[in-house]
Amino acid sequence: MDIIGRASRLRLYIGEADKYRGRPLHAALLEMLRSEGYAGATVIRAISGFGHASLMHTASILRLSEDLPIVIDVVDRPERIQELLTRLEEMKINGLATVEDVEVHQYGAHRVSTIPMDARVESMMTRDVTSIRPDAPVSEAVELLYGHLFRALPVVDSERRVVGMLTSGDLVQRAGLPFRMPLLERLGREPSELDMPTADWPVSRVMSRPPIMIRPDARATEAAQLMRKWGVKRLPVVDERGRLVGMLSRWDLISSAARRRAAEEPEPSVSAVPATTVDEVMRPDAPTVRDHAPISDVLDALLGSPIRRVIVVDEVGRAVGIISDADVMVPISEHAHPGVLEAVRARLPGGEAAAEHLRRASARSAEDVMNRDVVVVRSGTSLSDAAQLMVERGRKLLPVVDGEGRPIGVVSRDDVLHAIAQGHL
């Protein structure tokens, strides 16, 4: 964002103990400013001071509060500062705000973030990979996947040649695992508690084959193209004899792009090249529900959601939360049979009956089950910045909002992967 020349500076004075929706106010504001694409902000903690928010009165004595002053400086275009003032009023922030005109003489701009065309898989892959033999029982695979960050196992023979891939999805679809592994963990269901008739089946009976593999000297863009073509999130990396030497995930590609973006230094001499923005790749049909919507409306929205998530909005349409199928499952799991919600999610026969069971079982609202720590990006944000935010906050999906904070779409990891495959990131 080029803001050389006339700009405005907002200086906000608040107290260190001030909160917004249970979080430190200064942290909530800084996150909001960053996610909405403001040019820059700095939080300064003062060592002493007095004023409206930090002055305490006794009979005839003024004394300094332990609630030390916090100063937040925000610099951006005048119209954006005015938008911010309106937003602060709506948030009912209790503090002193001043605005002054400033002249910006230098503003560093990052070059467009891309993974170099010659970047190789071996520089991004994970080398210490957990694998499993094709004759191992399904129960062993469940134990290996439970509670770990990786969600797939390469299946290798006695010479470590890759003969298949086993994912959490394979276990749900072919081995009768009641939930995908992340949901199983959130529900607190230990593998030892599962009654799986397939527990003694060999892994070879439920794995995906043939495996989609890649060589370590292949380019990153080739890996992204393979993932997109075959609809997979991970690729076993093999040598010339097909032996496992590593694993490359969609997350590896995205985090590599984000790290490269963060490491770049400002270079004023770089010519301006339009960056890919979230608006160009986002899915515009993000489902929304009101914060006070009954759980039945949330379930209906989730049933129709291709992203398995619903954005929660307030009375003026601003994004205030997000709900996934897991968020709904956890609080009402005590009311329903373990397979009910998975039937709803997967749209299997009996899904509507299962949904009706849940409507009767709980009178909760969207506000009760939503995740309030929703991380959004503002329309016009570069896709590289969105990718970096995904990595920093561990998000699979980011709602895209307009200048008023209203959702207009969503951008996902798969959208970032597509940009990498096209050489745009």
Image (spheres, rainbow, N blue to C red):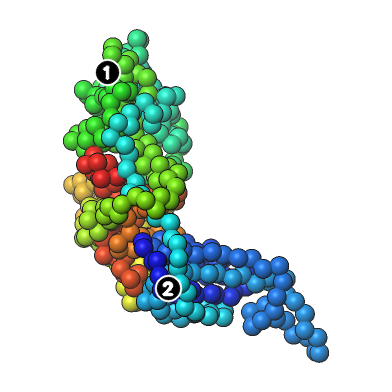
Comparing 288 with 424, the one in front is 424
Residue placed under numbered mark 2 in the picture: 7
Residue drawn at x 31%, y 23% is: 217
The amino acid beneath tag 2 is: Ala
Q: In the depicted view, which residue is nearer to us: 118 or 124?
A: 118
The location of residue 346, given as percent across then percent down, is 24, 46
Q: CA distance from mark 1 to mark 2?
A: 60 Å
- Observer able to see residue 91: no
What is the quadrant of residue 84 in the picture?
A: bottom left
Relative placement, left or right, of 1 versus 56 is left
Q: Residue at x 31, y 37 (%)?
A: 116
Q: Quadrant of the N terminus?
A: bottom left
**Horizontal arrangement in the rendering, residue 180 relative to residue 286 (left or right):** right
* Pointer 1 residue: 163
Tally of numbered discs: 2
* Residue 178 picture quarter: top left
Whether residue 70 is situated above or below residue 410 in the rendered picture? below
Q: Find numbered disc 1 in the image and state the secondary structure of the residue it sits on.
A: strand
Question: In the figure, 394 relative to 245: above or below?
Answer: below
Instruction: Identify the amino acid type marked 1.
Output: Val
Numbered mark located on residue 284 in the image: none
**Where residue 42 sits: x, y (%)?**
54, 64
Residue drawn 37% across the image and 76% down it? 79
- Please provide percent x and percent y for residue 274: 26, 55
Camera-side residue of 56 and 326: 56
Of callouts 1 and 2, the N-terminal one: 2
The residue sitting at the right extreme is: 60
Residue 115 visible, this angle: yes
Q: Is residue 297 above or below residue 198?
A: below
**Residue appearing at x 68%, y 71% in the figure:** 67
Q: Closer to the camera, 15 or 100?
A: 100
